[in-house]
């Protein structure tokens, strides 16, 4: 096998800083550490692309949580212009996240099977991505059931439990609409945030009013920014489903659950539901 000299740094040496000589760029972006984080376990051509793309996705999940958490705080502070800027950045990040699938979108089952064999039977499933779960909770897709895969990691499990109980971005947006005088029922704003959000006709009517009332332009722009976030997030999930069908087929996934069926059900969970249903009456 040809030596990949750019990867010859031993991880423990790179991380401990024992190698002499560096540059500001290397230090700021922790380049040595980054290039020691990919550990291929097979000779499969696509494994390096799979590892790097998965790691990049994890970084983007963290970035999206950072941005959506910021947007939530800005909405809570009634700073709609700041929230709009943050959400527009978020849409750009989601476009980049979707593009990460391109590195192995044409992988076949024969390319994937050797990699899957090394991952084990359920032990290294994407369902264990706790940062993705944080992202889903921030977007309002709450599910106590999804804490279960993280029970063996107490700190992560506790963090997710806290995120489950916290208001989502959409919860804070609905509270903002109520503060601005829109007739939202208290059941939509003051509720147990750990429960899955259930769409309500009164909220749908409030969004229709936002889009019709010229004095609520900033809230209409907020609604459109949220719609773009939901759209791009759904596109990422759609490509996830397509790639899974292409590489995996309809074989069982995490602990014998139907992977394709689970992803299809996830696609049916609409983010910010009344922003979509209200368009029928606009």
Image (cartoon, rainbow, N blue to C red):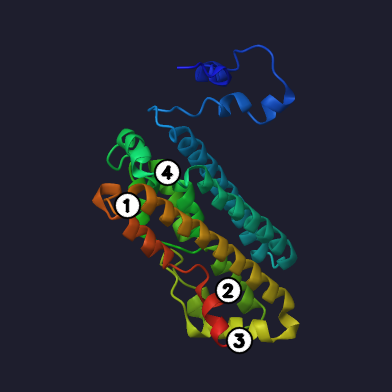
Quadrant (top left, top right, bottom left, bottom right) of the C terminus? bottom right
Residue at the image point whose x is 45% and y is 46% from the top: 106
Q: Which residue is mark 4?
A: 107
In terms of sequence position, does the residue under pointer 3 or pointer 2 come before the other? 2
* Residue located farthest toward the left when viewing the structure as drawn: 256
Mark 1 falls on what kind of element? Answer: loop
Relative image position of residue 203 (x, y in whole percent): 54, 81
Q: Are marks 1 and 3 in contact (CB under 8 Å)?
A: no
Which residue is tagged 3? 282
Mark whose residue sits in front, 1 or 2: 1
Q: Is residue 13 visible?
A: yes
Q: Is residue 183 left or right of residue 24?
A: left
Rendered image quadrant of residue 18: top right
Give me the C-alpha separation between circle 3 and circle 4.
Answer: 43 Å
Q: Residue at x 52, y 25 (%)?
A: 36
Q: Does label 1 or label 2 sit earlier along the sequence?
A: 2
**Which mark's residue is nearer the viewer, 4 or 2?**
4
Q: Secondary structure at mark 2?
A: helix
Q: Tell me the distance, in whole angstroms, between the alpha carbons under discs 3 and 2.
A: 19 Å
Specify few, some or many for label 1: CA neighbours under 10 Å numbering under 14, 14-19, or 20 or more: some
């Amino acid at each position: 096998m040809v030596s990949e000299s750019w990867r010859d740094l031993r991880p423990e040496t790179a991380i401990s800083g024992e190698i002499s000589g560096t540059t500001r760029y290397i230090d700021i972006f922790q380049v040595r550490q980054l290039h020691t984080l990919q550990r291929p376990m097979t000779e499969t051509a696509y494994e390096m692309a799979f590892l790097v793309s998965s790691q990049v996705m994890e970084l983007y999940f963290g970035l999206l949580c950072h941005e959506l958490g910021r947007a939530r705080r800005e909405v809570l502070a009634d700073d709609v212009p700041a929230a709009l800027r943050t959400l527009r950045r978020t849409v750009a990040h989601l476009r980049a996240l979707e593009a990460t699938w391109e590195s192995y979108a044409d992988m076949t089952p024969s390319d994937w099977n050797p990699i899957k064999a090394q991952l084990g039977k359920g032990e290294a499933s994407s369902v264990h991505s706790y940062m993705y779960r944080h992202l889903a909770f921030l977007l309002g897709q709450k599910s106590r059931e999804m804490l279960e895969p993280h029970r063996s990691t107490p700190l992560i499990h506790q963090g997710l439990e806290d995120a489950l109980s916290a208001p989502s971005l959409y919860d804070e947006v609905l509270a903002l609409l109520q503060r601005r005088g829109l007739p939202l029922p208290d059941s939509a704003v003051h509720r147990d945030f750990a429960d899955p959000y259930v769409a309500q006709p009164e909220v749908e009517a409030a969004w229709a009013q936002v889009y019709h009332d010229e004095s609520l332009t900033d809230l209409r722009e907020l609604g459109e920014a949220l719609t773009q976030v939901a759209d791009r997030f759904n596109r990422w999930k759609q490509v996830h489903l397509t790639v899974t069908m292409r590489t995996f087929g309809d074989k069982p996934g995490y602990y014998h659950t139907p992977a394709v069926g689970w992803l299809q059900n996830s696609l049916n969970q609409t983010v910010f539901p009344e922003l979509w249903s209200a368009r029928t009456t606009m």
